[in-house]
Image: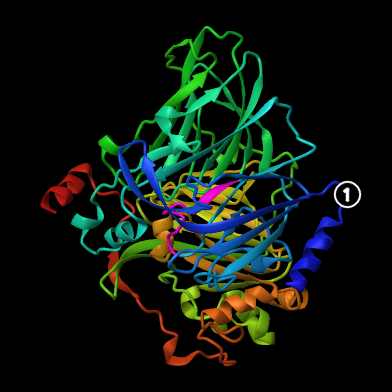
Amino acid sequence: MRSVLLIVLALANVACAAIVEHNWDIEYVDYKMEGMFTRKAIGVNGQWPIPGVVANKGDTLIIHATNKLKEPTSLHSHGIFQNGTNFYDGAAMVTECGIPMNGTFTYIIKLDQAGTYWIHSHFKSQTADGLRTTLIIRDPEEAYAYDEDIILPMEDWFREPAKTLIKQFNNPDPHIRFKPIVPYAIIGGTCASSKRIQFAPGKTYRIRLLNIGASFDFHFSMEAHTLRLIEVDGVMVKERVTHGVTVGTGQRASVLVTALNTTDNNYVFHADMFTDLLQMPRYNPLNFTGTIEYSPKARIKRERSAMWMNVSDLDLEPLDAEPMLEADQVVTLDAYSGIFSDQSFRHSFNNVTYAVPQIPTFLTALTMGDYANRTEVYGKQTDTHILKHLNVIQIVVNNHDYYSHPFHLHGHVFQVIEMGDIRSKERRVKTALSTPVKRDTVVIGGGHYAILRFRADNPGVWLFHCHIDFHIMLGLQMTFVEAPDKIQSRMKHNVPEMYRENCVAQGIRTSGNALGGSEAIDLGEEDQINPSPYPDRFESADPPSGWMLISYILQG
């Protein structure tokens, strides 16, 4: 506890910086969905949706998290780099052991970034069950002028708990796996139809759009109003005029909207929810609308100007104008899904479906000395790649599934260099501008690829994974261990005491290789890829037809 106090005092010793402190009891609550149904959600201090966190750039965020669930938990600050504090990244059994039942952990996060972020669990599928909220970091020196800030989280919410849905998605029988699941939309903390965005004539608003849901994308637009896109995933970009913005799972965006000069009418905003996993018109999109309110007495005037329009990542430019990086090291990831040897449906990178190690990968990197530079010590099913300090890393992601994946990288933003179609003989390609946009989550369509680049300037253990909660659980993630020697020299003496105490409380060792403590490099027969993919049992990059899906459902 003394080491934690010293860190807090050191971080607070900065001019104009504040300590933003929260005490969170993480517990189950009953949430009633607008009179339709009630189900358990994972809330904080008896509340769900969980109140958001707001701070300023330069502040220190402290969350004292007490776990009152019936299983371990963790908290990941999505998009925060955690430079020098990899042990606070919150990925259970990757960067920490997780918070045990009835245990507590204090996350101390120096907020050196500004922008739109969020906090969620990184243990099993707790995000889908509600352990998620917004994290807004305001910049005292904003690049764009506006009058007010509106925070608008958008989230899908299912009748069924996540474990029930995962059992469905894990089933090898397509009649069961393709059974439609129809979520509800919660917009700004309430049922979409109840949400009102209040405008005053002539004012300019920054609307922060966050998809903090589990699986569905959202498309946001406002009738009779123009959007000016200025931020994606915490990165400020050159203003781009549009009529609509799509936000994939895990992604964020900020738009500027200038209100009309009259209070005669109210208007409609759209937060339409969709997925390309379900190829059936009835479910795509699911149309949800709320009200842009100029006056509580005004009538709603409908306008058809809210078009289904998107801005390509490759057309955006960051304000910092960082030139396109040149790659030093290339990592190619082929994303597949199919039936594995345990007769379950799973996802994989390069035929490896992720499985958690017996001790956190961070602790292996921290304690294995020179052996930490060998991928063998991390276990085959963590699919670990070692990154050299300050190298420019190029990730080539080939999505062989017929549906999209929103891929997220911890600890970094990456430049989006190129995207294209892997199925076409012409290999239709679109490349970025000379100063490519940077973000931490990119949506790659089914049968498409993307080339991403980032500089390995943040030593640590960082996941790269699909942010559809159910796909994480089905194995679509892998690990970057960045500069193991720097991890050891910079963080060995900074790991808080309660971190190790939480490991011991769960019977998890705090040193050694992925199998739980041995100093061996070769993990032997225990370290086999299991389950492994059946040959020729992967899904096609072409979607099943609507008739095929209807057949599956009717026969099931």
Q: Position of residue 372 (x, y in %)?
A: 64, 82
Asked if residue 375 shows in the view, the reply is: no
In the rendered view, does 229 fall on the left or right side of 142?
Answer: left
Helix, strand or loop at mark 1: loop
Could you say which is closer to the camera, residue 241 or residue 199?
199
Q: Position of residue 346 (x, y in %)?
A: 34, 65
Task: Work out whether 253 lies above or below 372.
Answer: above
Q: Which residues are magenta?
A: 124-134
In reply to whether residue 538 is colored magenta, the answer given is no
Q: Quadrant of residue 373?
A: bottom right
Q: Quadrant of residue 138?
A: top right
Could you say which is closer to the camera, residue 551 or residue 497?
497
Q: Residue at x 51, y 79 (%)?
A: 506
Asked if residue 73 shows in the view, the reply is: yes
Q: Position of residue 48 (x, y in %)?
A: 47, 46
Instruction: Report the magenta stretch's main SS.
Output: loop
- Render colour scheme: rainbow
Q: Residue at x 20, y 61 (%)?
A: 173
Q: Which residue is mark 1?
A: 15
Few, some or many residues within 10 Å of mark 1 (<14, 14–19, 20+): few
Task: Work out whether 519 lies above or below 37.
Answer: below
Q: Residue at x 43, y 28 (%)?
A: 194
Q: Position of residue 71 (x, y in %)?
A: 44, 68
Circle count: 1
